[in-house]
Structures are given as C-alpha cells and as structure tokens.
Amino acid sequence: MDETQKPPTWYWIAVTVALLWNLMGVMAFFAQILTDPEIIAALPDAERALYENMPIWAYVAFAVAVFCGAFGCVALAMRKGWAVLMFKLSLIGVIVQNVNSFFVQDSFAVFGPGGTVMVALVIVGAIALLWFSLRARNNGWIS
C-alpha cells in the first residue's frame, strides 16, 4: 500500500474551490439540456441555431468535461490517484466540446470575443486541474 503525505492547508482550499467550479459546470450542463423549448424559441436566431444544431457528440463531450472534472475533485478530496485520470478525461471533453463550438458551429461569430473569455477560463482551469492532480500525486498527497 502506498504511503501518502499530509497535504498542506492550501491543498484543501484549492480542492474546495475546484469542486465548486466543477459543480457550476455540472449545473450549466443540466441547464443546457433541460432548457425549455419555449425559451430556446425566444432566443435570437443565431443563438437558437447553436442550440438546435448542437450534435450529440458535443453534448457527450460537455458531459465528460463537467462530470469527470467534478469526480476528479471528489477524488482529490478523498486523496485518490484516479483524480489524474478524471482530469485527463475532463480536459479531452473540454477540447472536443470547443472543437464543436469554434470550428463546427462557430459560436465566436454569435457571442464574439466576450464569449471567448469563459472558454479560455474553462480550458485553463482544466489544464490547471490536471497539473494540480499530477503535482498532488508526485508529492504523495494522493495515491
């Protein structure tokens, strides 16, 4: 059995913030898939087209990104090494989801540069969580 080292206090703060961030992603996923058709119909044409034309693989990528991110945070809280795998899968989900957003559907044309800020935060966050989990494993905080 692997011995783990006691993580520093800031580890627990980071895990808590990361879990809250990922739970907001889970909420965003459910908000998107459960949006009432009447609300979608009331959107401007370009935004409505994004909702109506989103391929199933993009929804799957969105689900993988947010659920694996949340499970990764739970694994960090439990000090389990499978956090690394969850964050790898989450990053892959984020990348695939954004391939749809920017290359298939061109959401940049709909939301402009302002919409890109959130996408950048999500990508940076997914990379940071993968790095953090690798660091936690290397430091013996998770096993």
Image (cartoon, rainbow, N blue to C red):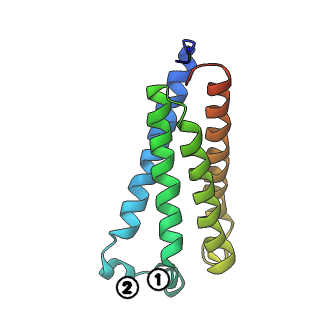
> Which disc number belongs to residue 74?
none
Q: Residue tagged by mark 2? A: 41
> Seen in the image, is 117 located left or right of residue 44?
right
In the rendering, at what x and y percent does residue 5 appear?
A: 57, 12
In the rendering, at what x and y percent does residue 111 appear?
A: 60, 72
Q: Residue tagged by mark 1? A: 48
Closer to the N terminus: mark 2 or mark 1?
A: 2
> Seen in the image, is 121 located left or right of residue 46?
right
Tags 2 and 1 in contact by the CB under 8 Å rule? yes
Q: Residue furthest front?
A: 1
Amino acid type at circle 1 is Arg
Q: CA distance from mark 2 to mark 1?
A: 7 Å
Residue located 55% across and 28% down the image: 14
* Label 2: how many Cα within 10 Å (few below 14, some 14–19, many 20+): some
Residue 111 position (above or below residue 73): below
* Label 1: how many Cα within 10 Å (few below 14, some 14–19, many 20+): some
Residue located 46% across and 30% down the image: 16
Amino acid type at circle 2 is Ala
In the rendering, at what x and y percent does residue 73 appear?
A: 48, 37
Residue located 62% across and 57% down the image: 92
| Residue 98, image quadrant | bottom right
Residue 31 position (above or below residue 44): above
User: The C terminus lies in which quarter of the figure?
Assistant: top right
> Seen in the image, is 124 located left or right of residue 10?
right
Q: Secondary structure at mark 1?
A: helix
Residue located 43% across and 58% down the image: 28
| Residue nearest the viewer, comparing 51 with 58 | 58
Q: Secondary structure at mark 2?
A: helix
Residue 126 position (above or below residue 142): below
Residue 2 position (above or below residue 14): above
